[in-house]
Image: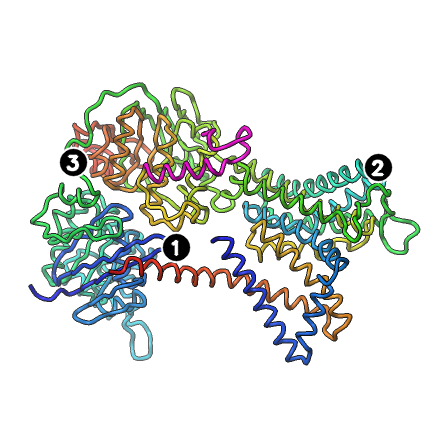
Amino acid sequence: MREPLIQMQNIIKVFPPNVVALDNVSVDFHQGEIHAIVGENGAGKSTLMKILYGIQPPDHGQIQFDGKTVVFQDSRQAIAAGIGMVHQEILLVNEYSVWENVVLGLEPTTWYGKIDRNKAREKVRESIAAYNFNLDVDSIVSEISVAARQKVEILKLLYRDVSVLILDEPTSVLTPQEIPQLFEKLRQLRDAGQTILFISHHLDEVTGLSDRVTVLRRGRKIATLRTAETTKTELAKMMVGREVIFTSLREPQSTGDIIFELKNLGYQDSDGKDRLSDINLTVRRGEIVGIAGVEGNGQLELVNAIMGLSTPSKGDILAMGTPIQDAQIIDRRKSIAFVSQDRSRLGGSLQATITENAIMTHHRLNQQLTKWQGHLLDQNAADQFTSELEANFDIDIGSIDNPFQSLSGGNQQKLILGRELTLETPFILMDQPTRGLDVHRQILAMRGNGHGILMISADLDELFRIADRILVLHRGRLVGDLPVEETNIEEIGYLMLEGHPKDEIG
Amino acid sequence: MKLDKKIISGVLGIVFALLLGAVVMLIQGYNPWATYGALFRYALGDIYTLATTLHNAVPLVLTGLSASVAFASGPVNLGQPGQLVIGAMFATIGGLYLDLPKGIMIPILLLLAMLGGALWSGIAAALRRLFNMSEFITTLMLNFVADYLTYWAISYPFFDSTAYSPMSPRINPGGALWRFGDFNSDVLIMIIIFLLVYFIFQRTTAGYEWRITGKNSLFARLGGCPVGKNYVAVMLFTGALAGLAGGLVIMGGPLRFLKGIGANYAWDGVMIAMVANNSVIGTLLYGIFFSVMQTGALGMELITQVPREFIMVIQAVIVLVVVAGRGTLDIVLDKIATRRRVQEHQT
């Protein structure tokens, strides 16, 4: 076999004071391959790629690129050397056109320093044609689809002549229909000699797309395999560290009483615009109800109304049969657990200690954490509570007195999940919970114990893996309510985009 | 580990500021050794100076605690100057009308002072809750109102007709704080209040909610903390602390309300809170240290050529060095921790 294009050797990355995000990771990437990096949340995938891209310096180890040892101080140097990365969030200037975004920072200029617009536009048009990207150079970015914006991001890097493309969970912002197109593009790029490194935790995508795959778990490299020689089950086992059963994740189960209900819920924003209209849904014990939808179709408003951050303009919210739309948040929390993907804004306080984050809400509902009729916090009980969470939810905590931000993202998420599930409320609201097999296992366990779960997610694979019913939110309305057995990804995807079933004329 | 780090950064900051001050003195032709010698001798040299230093620390520490607790809990209460003079005014008026034995009168006047401060911060809290006006602005504006209101009060209704400048008459003797030799009992009250604030802020459930709200109020709200109620509680509590400082200034000092009685105590308190990074213990320690500097400055001026104002320079340098140094030290300590971890994991 020829010499690898990139060799990362014995990379160690520490998040001070105690978290070892990468522990002696060595991995090789070959020229012209699609190489997937998989692992649970907090396994170190993004960190490894950020080190390669020069955003974060490694604390130990070295990187060989094209036979030479390289040290990138920042991403500019990495791009100059030929390594580019597309982040999960798309970072473009919305008001600019496609070509303006592509050349931004590397504009061709005339001899006296003026941007040579014609030349720039022409060069971008040529690259679009060369890579067959199907984009209009003059479209304004805010007016094109997310998938097209992602192409612009990729084009931006290709324009800078990178030979290695790193993509951090590129499919997370795409609809199911858009994903195959992206994959087709990536295959074309590979065939044109590009090296593609691809972060994912969707094993379907990994097995469908990549040539080789590297599995990380808790900062260690478990293996690098040829994708053709492995299976999803084997990869999942490596990721999680134990057997994961795919097919029967969701065991059939009879559901119980209705524990959560929305009746004709409506919400108007401050401009009087309807953001939610006629939302009706029920969640029963032992049931996982998924809400699919493209982001920005009322998910945020729905969560705010349920949690009590906003007042609905119409309708009722019932928990355990009692209307709660006018209740204080703490009273809602007696029946609702809330897991949000937004760890630093909604789920925790980065500067507060791990214990302080762990006992939130419990400090008012769990009498064992307080003394003097709730007025005095029992520090020992709080510490013990945190240690129990650490053990029960397998969280990698250095010291519970460290700030929450000392934890890696995945471990922060586990702490939030643990805190909320430990509330033992009948109803659990999950807003875009971080995808991951471990999380799914826990959600299903809660379902098995007779909890009812409402899960808002843009990730259809996730919904299909664990939900019992899928509702589709489109422009503030629920446009579908389908048992998973009776539907498929394509049907739900169509509802998400169009707001009505396929056979209906809209 | 955490407290150690704060102590290291504090001590380093102070040492560095004093060295920098020494350099400035050398450039100006003064002897830094003799100057600092005089400074510390006149602040800590004997029982009397020590007692004076501690007495002078009282308004600094109490207004500092007020600012620390407010900032760390979210509300930007910058009304300590106004709350202090209103508290002083309340204690004075109470002291003029009441004539009771010390054991009863002193607690009553202290409560009145706290009530005055809480009332003044309560106005700002009400404006926030009812009209969503930022307390950052209203507390600052109310400082002016308080200043002129008290000036009016000692010029007209409570003017001491025997005096040549605006001041109130002396309060009744029952309102004068106890003294133990050179020590004024306001120091004791300060220590009790410090312990109380520490306990409330660090140990109670309410204090926990205040701290989390100060760091991420949306998270606290979603977690079920009544952030609106807590906001009002913090405003009233910190207003009461500043008001108490005012009461003690009257009752442990001139026993009457003089023009300019608030001096610069409250702004120094805000500065101390910032240097202490809103830590309750840090505020106590820095408050005492700043009092050492300010008290010693008088003696320094007396026996050396260095003007008292020079201490302001050193104070300012301490603020800059400690605040800037905090981040730097974090980076250095993180580097050390990282290196240790890497060595453990290296193969």
CB of mark 3 within 8 Å of CB of mark 1?
Answer: no
Chain bearing mark 2: B
- Is residue B191 rendered to the left or right of residue A3? right
Marking on residue A246: 3
Q: Which residue is mark 2?
A: B101
Mark 2: give few (<14), some (14-19) or many (20+) Cα within 10 Å. few
Colour logic: rainbow
Q: Give the amino acid type for the residue marked by disc 2 in the picture.
A: Pro
Mark 1–mark 2 Cα distance, whole angstroms, equals 57 Å
Q: Quadrant of residue A12?
A: bottom left
Q: Earlier in the sequence, mark 3 or mark 1?
A: 1
Q: Quadrant of residue A361?
A: top left
Marking on residue A17: 1
Image location of residue B251, percent across then percent down: 79, 47
Q: Which span of residues is magenta-colored?
A: A366-392
- Residue A370 part of the magenta segment: yes
Q: Is residue A469 above or below residue B323?
A: above
Prevailing secondary structure class for the magenta stretch in the rendered image: helix
Q: Is residue A274 above or below residue B302?
A: above
Residue at x 23% of width, y 69% of height: A81
Mark 3: give few (<14), some (14-19) or many (20+) Cα within 10 Å. few
